[in-house]
Image: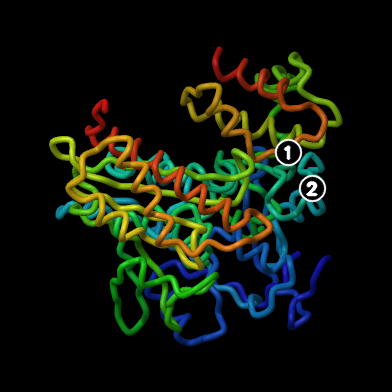
Amino acid sequence: MFNISVLQEPETLEAAVAMLKADADLRVIAGGTDVLIRIQHGGDGWSRLLSLRSIKSLETISLRGDGTIVIGATAPFAKIFLDPIIREHLPSLAEAAVSMGGPQIRNVATIGGNICNGAVSGDSASTLFALDALLKLESQDGERIIPIHEFYAGPGKVHLRPGELLTAVLIPRDSYQGTGGHYIKFAMRKAMDIATLGVSVVCRVRAGKFQDLRIGLGVAAPVPIRCLEAEAFARGLEVTQANCREIGRLAVKASKARTSWRASKDYREHLIEVLTERAVLEAAKRAGGLHAE
Amino acid sequence: MLNSNTAGIATLRQLALTVNGKPYAFQVDIRETLLDVLRNRMQFTGVKQGCAVGECGACTVLVDGTPVNSCIYLAMWANGKTVTTIEGLEKDGELSEVQAAFVEEGAIQCGFCTPGLVLSTTALLDSGRTFTEDEIRRELSGHLCRCTGYQKIFDAAAKVLNK
């Protein structure tokens, strides 16, 4: 049994934002794979819940006419992994989705929950950073759309205003069209583990040169980050193994890795260097651009 | 009863669900998990409580055909849904194909993880998809087994999925 005193189950988004506005103490629960564990461990302030599970419209994944991919906030990871739109256009997000938790967790855990928890180790974060994802936040007073990197405030903290719900993740066409991508999760086990480091790379290659390279890192700083210096260095650069190695070296500069019981700072920095190089190489290959040196 | 809620008062709701092909309707407390209800109130003791935090997979049941950890799934969320536990797989005294494969391959030792693993394998079989060896391992990775070393479990799953 969980310490739950209120469980609201609205069936529409309108009802949900109205309930959130009326009761500031309501905490949002979707898949429950983090929230229920927090409650199980005696977490304070989590006894009044607003469940999003009955709002079916929040689960859909669609491709809009303007090419924007819209992922409903309560789409579970298993659904994201199997979705034909995601597999065709955002294969690195499919890779990230299937690396998260285990199968039963992926069947219920949602992408919106993964983001709103603000965990730097969240498996979706680095890929969504690399994809320049936008977040749609709705409240009874209106909606706003912000870049995902503006949403993360600190470890376990996000800029969600009172009464606001994350309703969708948007990936504009310009962010993914013609790109190759790759996500590498490094953890002690192959399954059911939290990332020691997550590296996600998205790139465009033209005539053997990087036209555009985006590197997202998870667990390399207090919040997920992009490696802007390495990205700027790569633009216009020939796709070679040596250049990819240098990009990996530069990626470390953006990081603020720390020592935790999972890994030391030095080890994490080593992982950033090596895994960024590998992810860039694979992403470039998928973008159709890796030539023999 | 690990916790009582802040008000200390049970909030009851009507739950209607189908378990192993049979409809049920009764009142549940919003604090109860699907595991609590299936195991303790409905006596489906094939649903095991292991870690109670969604790590071990012993409490896995199928909700509308999808494997979920019933220890971190509120009972109310099963309202209107169809649940399958290990007790629902045998038909007229005959083991299901997956159960038979687990027996034939010797994929069972103490048996605590077995209901969950059989149910996850059943969901894979029912999906109609095909799976590589790596994918089978990945799809069964949400179950901890402390006896077998997994090889025979993998053999049993591969036998039914790649027949």
Quadrant of the drawing holding the C terminus of chain A: top left
Q: Which residue is mark 2?
A: B50
Q: Which amino acid is tagged 1?
A: Leu
Q: CA distance from mark 1 to mark 2?
A: 10 Å
Element carrying mark 2: loop
- Decide which of B92, A21 is in the foreground and name it: A21
Q: Given contact means CB atoms under 8 Å apart, are the residues at marks 1 and 2 in contact?
A: yes
Indicate the position of residue B149 as horizontal and vertical percent values: 76, 27
Locate residue A31 relative to residue A275 in the image: left or right. Answer: right
Q: Residues within 10 Å of mark 1 (few under 14, many from 20)?
A: some
Indicate the position of residue B103 as horizontal and vertical percent values: 77, 18
- Decide which of B148, A212 is in the foreground and name it: A212
Indicate the position of residue B119 as horizontal and vertical percent values: 66, 34
Locate residue A242 relative to residue B51 in the image: left or right. Answer: left
Q: Which residue is mark 1?
A: B144
Q: Which amino acid is tagged 2?
A: Gly
Res. A100 in view: yes
Res. A54 in view: no
Answer with mark 1 or mark 2, whichever residue precedes in sequence: 2
Q: Which chain does tag 2 point to?
A: B
Q: Residue at x 61, y 65 (%)?
A: A35
Q: Residue at x 47, y 81 (%)?
A: A20
Mark sitting on residue A260: none
Element carrying mark 1: loop
Q: Residues within 10 Å of mark 2 (few under 14, many from 20)?
A: some
Indicate the position of residue B97 as horizontal and vertical percent values: 65, 19
- Classify residue A45 by image quadrant: bottom right
* Tag 1 and tag 2 share a subunit: yes
Q: Residue at x 86, y 31 (%)?
A: B110
Q: How many marks?
A: 2
